Image (cartoon, grey):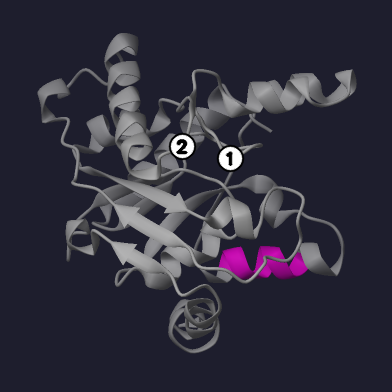
Amino acid sequence: MFYRLLKYVILGPLLRLLFRPAIEGMEHIPAEGAAIVAGNHLSFSDHFLMPAILPRRITFLAKQEYFTGPGLRGRLIAAFFRSAGQIPVDRSGGSAGQAAIREGLGVLSRGELLGIYPEGTRSPDGRLYKGRVGVAVMALKAQVPVIPCAMVGTFEIQPPGRRLPRIGRVTIRFGEPLEFSRFAGMDSERYVVRSATDEIMYAILAMSGQEYVDQYASDVKAEQQPHGVRARLRKGR
């Protein structure tokens, strides 16, 4: 109920008014059935803009920190993500990564749309970074299509570190669904999930026009931080 109120009454109309999103490729979003929408991640605003324009409800795997932030702002953000049905994910790696995959597969098993940012974290500089293989593992296990999505202009309106977005126009592009049925039963093969992930990232790259960096964004962020926090960032925190 609160999700529909946000989407159609409170947040959705406001976002459309302020950012006048240009939508391309909406016909690639299936009217029903499970699918993964995999997008680049340039801005905190991405979390709001894509769900606002999609005709179907989409559930994102959101980083756990969005649910545990301090102060009034932290509580408001946590309340929003919980009310919108988003799933907190521990990005520390190992068993936490497997738990995230199980949560995502649960969404897909209900025939719903699952949203994921394969880069694992926001781009620190507007470039597109190497994708994590979880998106491919879920696509292969659930045998669902992956719809690539490119957010264009959201880095400019709200780059990392900026609390409130600037008013400006953004573009949201959806590409043709990618099918991986040829890899059925091979979701535990490292070279297969790497290949499928790279195919997804290439599709996003072709639509976004970003420069590609063959590194994980979390590693680049770690190098920019004091030594004491590098280890945590390298694990995707």
| Residue closer to the observer: 84 or 229 | 229
Q: Is residue 236 above or below residue 19?
A: above
Q: Quadrant of residue 208?
A: top left
**Residue 44 in sight in this render:** no
**From which residue to which does the magenta span run?**
75-82
State the quadrant of the N terminus.
bottom left
Three-letter amino acid code at the position of disc 2: Gln
Residues at circles 2 and 1 in contact by the CB criterion of under 8 Å? yes
**Element under disc 2:** loop
Q: At which x and y percent is residue 140?
A: 24, 30
| Secondary-structure class at tag 1 | loop
Q: Is residue 19 left or right of residue 191?
A: right
Give the residue furthest to the left: 182
Residue pictured at 52% horizontal, 72% vertical: 19
Residue 11 spot, x, y in % from top left: 54, 80
Give the main secondary structure of the magenta stretch: helix
Q: Give the numbered dot on residue 43.
A: none
- Which residue is tagged 2? 210
Which residue shows up at 45% across the image and 35% down it? 118
What amino acid does circle 1 point to?
Gly
Circle 1 is placed at which residue position? Answer: 126
Query: Residue sitting at 41 percent across and 45 percent down?
Result: 39
Q: Residues within 10 Å of mark 1 (few under 14, many from 20)?
A: many
Disc 2 from disc 1: Cα separation: 7 Å
